[in-house]
Image: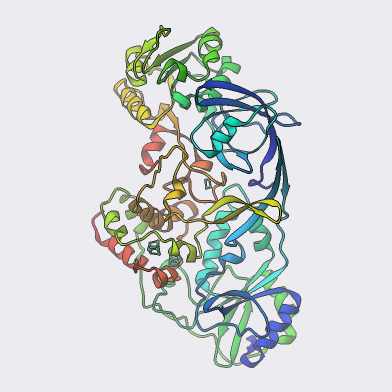
Amino acid sequence: MKGIKKSQLSNFLQQVSAKYSLYVPAQVDGVTRFQKYSSEREPFLTANTQLSPKELFFPQTEQLYCYETHKQEVKVEELAASSEPQVLFGVRPCDMQAIGVLDDVFLGKGYEDVYYRAKRANTLIIALACSQAEATCFCDSMGVDPAFAPQADLMMYETEDGYLIEALSDQGKDFLQEFSSALEELRSEKPQAPACELKAETDGLVEKLQKMFEHSVWAELSRKCINCGTCTYLCPTCHCFDIESKTRGGKEVKFRCWDSCMYKEYTLMAGGHNPRPTKKERVRQRFLHKLQYMPERYGKWGCVGCGRCIDKCPVNLDITKVIRELREVEA
Amino acid sequence: MNPLVPIIGKISKIVDETPDTKTFHVTTSNGKPFTPLPGQLAMVSLPAVGEAMFSISSQGDDHLEFSIKKVGMLTEALHDAEVGQEIGVRGPYGNGFPLDFCKGKDMLFIGGGIGLAPLRSLINYCVANREDFGNLQVIYGARSPADLCFKEELFETWPKVRDMRVDVTVDKGDENWQGNVGFVPAFLEQLNPSPEGKVTVTCGPPIMIKFVLQSLAKMNYQPDNIITTLEMRMKCGVGKCGRCNIGSCYICLDGPVFTLTQLNQLPNEY
Ligand code: SF4
Ligand code: SF4
Ligand code: FES
């Protein structure tokens, strides 16, 4: 199988970055996330990134349009939702699955989000199979194969001597063609998929949850949550946003920014009514959204088992433990 | 077509309905911004203040109407606006009322306060397409005579429509009030319209809806033939921003109109 020798990796990335806007996992200021490639920046490939790649399609803040108001007049100027051709290198299978979830949300159900589409349609994704599961990984419980990402354009496997690479989509094939001179025949074999030690038992979960909306377990499960929102910002599938205005360089700009169902204001209505007034309703919303509503609406889990929320929740609210408790209590 | 960017329209007329509710007519240089179905929603914005979702309470050949109660920053700014003010509108959003289901049937509308606004779009549709519907009846209540919305239609226009009756009640009368005094649910039971061949559409304060539904059940109305509209906080209007869900339903796309049968299947979180 064709591949890239480890010693040739930076050479390959440099060739790609000469033609495309290339993003690689890297550590910057103590945080691992997808960064624009530069030759001084060593790609971080030993584990998944702390921040998910969703910010490349759905940035934390994004301008929507400009407007001007003068006395009774209002003028709106649309901002072109464009993007340069970009390549994402080293996306893990769980995060690729999460991008598939975002595709369903932003491109499906009758309306296309033009800002998301502009970036998504212009991006080629090279996924990297995991050869080792972290203690917080449970993707294989959520229908993800840690060694394969079927929705990626290309699939890469780390071996002893390098990275095997195969094309999964037509764009992926063209890309391999384009950079064929940087590839060589490697002798190694595809490695075995790692097994996650952390598990979540999900059989029959949706059906059970459909009967548990009013269950007393939600009060118990939400007790320690401080509604900080960390879990939702880190989650690769969370897509909620707010729309707000700001003044930038004398211009008024409408922008959207990540929002979180963990906050009271999220559902607070102008008259003061709030359908999710306490953390019990908000925590229930988060877990039911991922484990019941998403499967009902899009036919897939809203959790891909990446483990980020487990790793970073300040009070240790672990979604796999939540799933376990939900299974154990009587519906 | 970018669903998040508003069209700019102009307020062409403002009607004072009650001390805290005004109806705004919005038009553009090309006529109405779009042609909604009765019961659909639109995002209305004063870009410098904010944007919020409102039901479109009626439409004319060249304009849309929004009946807006003062409850927060945006609605206060709208109430301060004058004719000629340009505003943003985008939409239409949501499912609207099930017209095909309603056609050929008698229609009973039960509204309270500003809750008559979404019903009005359908009432005026029924009036404009009179031959498509059976008898029409509106039962409407507000806190006081001054709080009644759409007085001209209630007391002048609608009662003159063929086979249409309008019954109005107030919680508390004043020296000039000659009509019924009492809450909507009690008034409904007193009028006791037969459920036979009827579709009932109700909208109002949550507490009124709760008791109206109880009264309708007592009077033998079936959940399949009872329709209501829901309200949630909204930002995008197109099922992306996440906040308007009730269970796996997004009110901006799958609602705001539901039959009672559908509502009973949703989690109780609205
Ligand atoms: S990270 Fe933990 S504490 Fe913070 S909102 Fe999420 S579950 Fe609650
Ligand atoms: S819910 Fe937690 S484990 Fe699941 S995808 Fe989101 S961040 Fe990852
Ligand atoms: S308003 Fe954004 S999802 Fe409904």
Nearest the eye: A3 or A306 = A306
Colouring convention used in this rendered image of the protein: rainbow
Task: Name the quarter where the C terminus of chain B is drawn.
Answer: top left
Q: How many marks?
A: 0
- Residue under the image location 39 percent in, 78 percent down: A135
Q: Quadrant of ligand 2?
A: bottom left
Examine the rendering and report whether any part of residue B207 can be seen: yes
Q: Quadrant of residue A195?
A: bottom left
In the displayed structure image, the side of residue B124 where residue B208 appears, left or right: left
Nearest the eye: A313 or A300 = A313
Question: x, y (%) of residue B180?
Answer: 37, 11
When the figure is inspected, residue A164 is found, relative to residue A35, above or below; the finding is below
Question: x, y (%) of residue B236?
Answer: 57, 47
- Residue under the image location 43 percent in, 20 percent down: B198
- Residue under the image location 60 percent in, 92 percent down: A187
When the figure is inspected, residue B1 is found, relative to residue A316, above or below; the finding is above
Question: x, y (%) of residue A219?
Answer: 28, 54
Question: x, y (%) of residue B247?
Answer: 41, 47
When the figure is inspected, residue B206 is found, relative to residue A320, above or below; the finding is above
Nearest the eye: A126 or B80 = B80
Nearest the eye: B25 or B118 = B25
Examine the rendering and report whether any part of residue B41 can be seen: no
In the displayed structure image, the side of residue A268 where residue A39 appears, left or right: right
Q: Residue furthest left?
A: A330
- Residue under the image location 62 percent in, 58 percent down: A62
